[in-house]
Image (cartoon, rainbow, N blue to C red):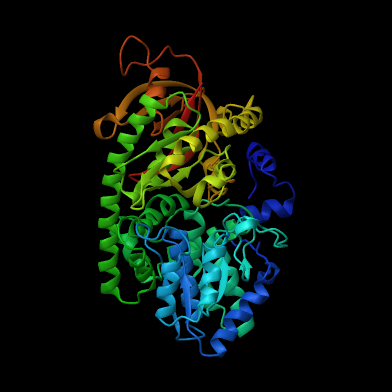
Amino acid sequence: MELNYKILEYLNTLGYETEEELSEFLSDKPRKTYDPFLLLNMDAGVDLILSAIEDGETICVYGDYDADGITSVTLLTDVLSELTEKVFYYIPSRFDEGYGLNRDAILRIREAGADAVVTVDCGSVSRDEVRYARELGMKVLVTDHHTVVKESAAECPLINPIQEDCPYPFSYLAGVGVALKLAQALVDSAGLDRTVLTRNLDLVGIGTIGDIVPLVDENRTWAKYGIRMINLGRRKGLRALMEAAGLKPGSLTAEQISYVIVPHLNAAGRMEDASIAVELLKTEDDEEARTLAAKLVELNRRRKDAQEKEFMKCARIAEERYGEENLLLIEAEDAHEGITGIVAGKLKERFGKPAIIVTPTEDGCLKGTGRSVDDINIFDLLNGSRELFTRFGGHRAACGFTIKRELLPELRENLKRDILPMMEKAQSLSEEKPFGDIYLDTEEVSLETTRQLAALAPFGRDNPQPEVAVSARPKYVKRIGKDGKYLSFTAELEDGRELRCVDFKNPDDTEKALVSQTGKGAAPSGGLIGIKGYLGSQTWNGKTYIQMIVTGVD
């Protein structure tokens, strides 16, 4: 594909400069992947599993209750089932147990007959829990991608690309990506047919996209192949979920995975039991697939209702009490624990600052969950107060912790202090940022340009959809959607062509900038203004036209 030179320059700024790098980035069949045995402790991990199987021991795959953990559990249990019938999985309850390994669960797993535990998407900092499992006579292998803290690192074979001294070339795999590398190593070592891997690439795509890891390098490979596998519609449970959620197999995008598929899978663990989602992904029965898909749709509906009510409540608290703060730390006494992470994310988007929500636990503590803006590493921010937490984990974009209620004021003051140098650094990096990523002249606004921009997908962290800027005269400004929630207008380009524009994110601000004081719906003064957003195309009644999803005006 011969790219517009401005799009090419944009890719250069992202670090894709050589012909080889550009070809790999744009390829429909990317080849960037690495030898799984480059991961530290992979040899030991494979030996542990194969020796357990050879000795007739039972293996428990222990995962997390989000989409990354759910897909990791499904993938690894499927691969292990090719080697042994003595395998089962365990996902802790978000409400009763919380994230990661816990002693009660380990005891239950042992009593259920497990001789070995293999974690996915958790366990890196579970030193005490791993010791307890080994005291009970179990072998333990931890596979994870969360930040490793040396003082509390698990004392067992630990496979985590982000850990110190790991020579793996790419550090930002999702939990399901690490599970896939273990699966690759097992397939190679045990001589299994590689179809056991390819049939699970849909799971790798969902977990990778859903966990908001950087969609670059090897993750981009897994996302692309994952999307392709999903669109083949071979997994019965996933196909049933897509149909129940109103999606059409065959044309699914990363955005639809992120905003539709992932929330439905997450809803199981947020509202009830994550095993519902695992069983959906595992089932080979059409009727069971439809039943479980309908269950997830209902759980997701309940999740959205609870989430919207709590978001409105927390947004009011943020505006009334913490409007001048650089970080939101909100006590939500009655919040449903399953939706606090989503609410924190929505608050982060609304106010443009890190947001943390804490809810009470039965033992008199507070459980916190946080989400952060791109420029602030929330794990590093909270790690400065690590001594205050009884449990703590996460990564740069999200975190979770448990803290004694009486220590919350001290945490609040620490965060107020510690965020300042981070903000100063972020500010210096963002100064003089241009309006939009790619400025297009009038003649460059074309369907061919939209096709070239689409080739940069899948979009996500570290590969954002580029904001395109154009000069145009806005007119026909009007509110659309339920209760006028969104804004629509037409942008007249300098050659007279019209560009359809819709603002879903900041309609009020955009409307103020566009509409004159003389009346709503009237065209503004008629001068050229800058409009930026995501340029794409839509087809309606057989006609394809260019559309911009607006992110700002200047």
Name, please, the residue furthest toward the front: 406
Q: Position of residue 402 (x, y in %)?
A: 45, 49
| Residue beneath the point at 66% across and 59% down | 163
Q: How many marks?
A: 0
Q: Specify whether 456 is left or right of 95.
A: right
- Residue 226 shows up from this direction: yes
Of residue 406 and residue 88, the one placed in the foreground of this image is 406
Of residue 239 and residue 116, the one placed in the foreground of this image is 116
| Residue beneath the point at 34% across and 40% down | 332
| Residue beneath the point at 28% across and 34% down | 481
Q: Quadrant of residue 504?
A: top left
Taking 287 as reference, is 312 above or below it?
above
Of residue 61 and residue 365, the one placed in the foreground of this image is 365
- Residue 548 shows up from this direction: no
Taking 490 as reference, is 100 above or below it?
below
Q: Quadrant of residue 273?
A: bottom left
Q: Position of residue 154 (x, y in %)?
A: 59, 65
Name, please, the residue furthest toward the bottom: 55
Q: Specify whether 336 is left or right of 382.
A: left
Name, please, the residue furthest toward the right: 18
Q: Position of residue 274 (x, y in %)?
A: 36, 63
Of residue 113 and residue 552, the one placed in the foreground of this image is 113
Q: Position of residue 168 (x, y in %)?
A: 70, 62
